[in-house]
Amino acid sequence: MSDLPIVDLDMAPNVAVVIIAIYVLLVCASLFTWALARRRPERDYSELRQRVRTWWVIVTLFAVAIALKPVFAICLLGFVSFLAFKEYITLIPTRRADHRVLFLAYLTIPIQYYWAADGWYGMFIIFIPVYAFLILPARMVLIGETEGFIRAAGTLHWGLMTTVFSLSHTAFLLALPAAGNPVAGGDGLLLYLLLLTQLNDVAQYVWGKSLGRHKVVPKVSPKKTVEGLLGGIATTAVVAVVAAPYLTPLARWEALAAGLLIGAAGFIGDISVSAVKRDLGIKDSGNILPGHGGILDRVDSLTFTAPLFFHFIYYLHY
Amino acid sequence: MIRLLRLLFWIVVARPLVLVVLGLNVRNPAGLPEKGPAIVVANHNSHLDTFVLMSLFPLRLLGALRPVAAADYFLKNRLLAWFTLNIVNMIPIERKVGRETDPLQDCITALGAGDILLVFPEGTRGETEALARFKGGVARLKEQFPDVPVIPIYMQGLGRVMPKGEIALVPVVVDVFVGASLPWTGSRPAFTHAMEEAVAALKAQAPARIWRH
C-alpha cells in the first residue's frame, strides 16, 4: 500500500460545504415528499418517501467514508462493486461448469481496488480489460465445457467491465496526486462525480414527470422522455459549472463539457441496465435499497459516467 | 456458555455470511411460523441451506431452531459433531433404520418442547435446482402432531453458491419462497406427496437462472 493515511479528518473545507449543501437538499426532499403525501392523501407516495429515506443512508455512508479518507472510502466503493457484481451474477444464467471461474471473477474485485488504492495506473487500467479478459476464458476452456462458451465468457466479462472496472474509476479519483486539484483533492472529484451523476438521475426523472411527452427509447425504457433527458442534461450542466470551482480544477468551459458528458452518459448507463433487465425479463435488479430496487438500479448511470469523467479530467489535468 | 457461543457464531459468522456475502430475497415472509412447535420443509442443494433457513427467523427464536440432519454424515468426526450438536443445535437422524429404536424420537421430543424443526425431506443434497423424491419422516411426525404447522419453502441460488463437492463459495443472492401451511391429509403417502407438490409449486414461481450442464 502506498503512503496514503488511513484516517485524515482534515476534510477540504469545500468538500465539507458541499456535503452540507447535499444534506440541505435532502431535508428539502424529505419536507417536499412529506407535504406531497399530506396534500394528496388519496395517492400513494410511500415508494417515493422510502426512496428519499434510502438517500439519507447512502449520503451518510459516503460522507463518513469521505471523512475517513481514503482507504475506507475505497473499501466502501469496492463493496459497492461487489454488491453490483453479485446482483449481476444472480440475474444472469450461468453454467454449472463455471463455478470456479465465477469464484476467480469475484477475486478480481479486491485486486482491482488494490491497484486503485495503490495508485498504480498502468496495472489498474489493464487488469480487467486484458488480464481478466484472457485468464477467465482460459480457465473456462481448461474446464472443457464448450456448449455456451461464448455466451458465458461474454456475459461474465460484460459484468466485470461495468460493475468492477468502470465503477473502480471512482476509487482511482482518490489516488490521483493532490497537486492536480488544489481546491479539494481527490475527495472533491469523487464528490463532484457522484453528485452530478445522481442529481442527473433525479433531474431527468423530475423533468420527465412534469413535462415528459415524447418517448426516447420506448422499447428499452418506456418512461424515458426527450423532455426528461434534455431537462436533466441541462440541469446537470448548470450544476456542473456552478460546483466546479469549489470541487475541481476545471475551467468554466471544461465544467460545462463535463456536465454534458455526465448527463448524456448517465442516461445511456441507466438504459443499458434497463436493457439487461428487459432481456432477462425482470423489473428490479434486487431489493437491497428500499424504494430504489437493487444496487445495480442505483449505480447504473455511474457505470458509464465514472470512467468517462475520470478520463476527461485525467487527460486535462493530470 | 454454549448458548453464548452459539449466539456469537450466529451474529459474527452465520448472519453476515447469509445476509451480506450472499443476500436474501424472501417472498411471503409473513408465512413463516412466529413460534414453535412447527416444521419447516425445504429443498436441499448445499450445506449453507441450513444457515439460510435459520437466518429467516429472528434471533429470539434461535434457541428453538432445530435443523434435522444425517447422523452418519455430521457425527463422523468429533470436531464436526461438537459443532453441529452444540453450535448449530442439530438433531441427528440415523439414516439406516434399526428396529429397536424410533429414529424420529428426538424430533418428537423437540416438537413436544415447542421447537421449530428444519427438515430437508429429500434426505440429501441433490442436483442443483432439481427436486428429488421426499422421504416419509415428516408425514409420520404430522400424523402424530396434526396441529403442528408444516411450512414448505423453496430456496433458489444455493446450488450455485456452493454445490455438492465444491469448496469455493460463489456469492449469489438467494431467493426464498415461503408457502402456506399444509393441512394433514389423512394418510402419510398423500401428505408426503402434498409436500412435494407444494415445494414444486414454489419452485415454479422462481425464474430459471442456470444453463444446462
Image (cartoon, rainbow, N blue to C red):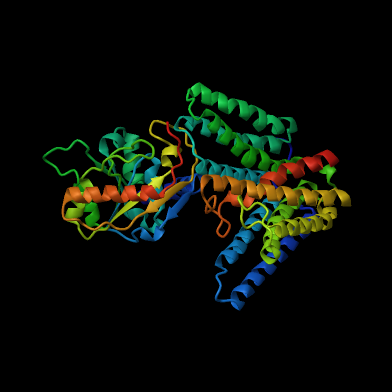
Query: Can you say which quadrant of the picture contains the N terminus of chain A?
Result: top right
Image x and y of residue A71, in percent: 68, 43
Task: Please name whichever residue, A315 or B208, is drawn nearer the observer in this view of the structure.
Answer: B208
Tell me if residue A171 can be seen.
yes
Left or right of A77 in this view: B152? left
Image x and y of residue A314, in percent: 80, 40
Which residue: 36% across, 59% down? B31
Task: Please name whichever residue, B34 or B3, is drawn nearer the observer in this view of the structure.
Answer: B34
Left or right of A42 in this view: A63? right
Query: Can you say which quadrant of the picture contains the C terminus of chain A?
Result: top right
Task: Please name whichever residue, A71 or A135, is drawn nearer the observer in this view of the structure.
Answer: A135
Left or right of B1 in this view: A81? right
Image x and y of residue B57, in percent: 39, 55
Which residue: 82% across, 38% down? A315
Residue projecting furthest to the left = B100
Which residue: 60% across, 63% down? A53
Residue A18 falls in image quadrant? bottom right
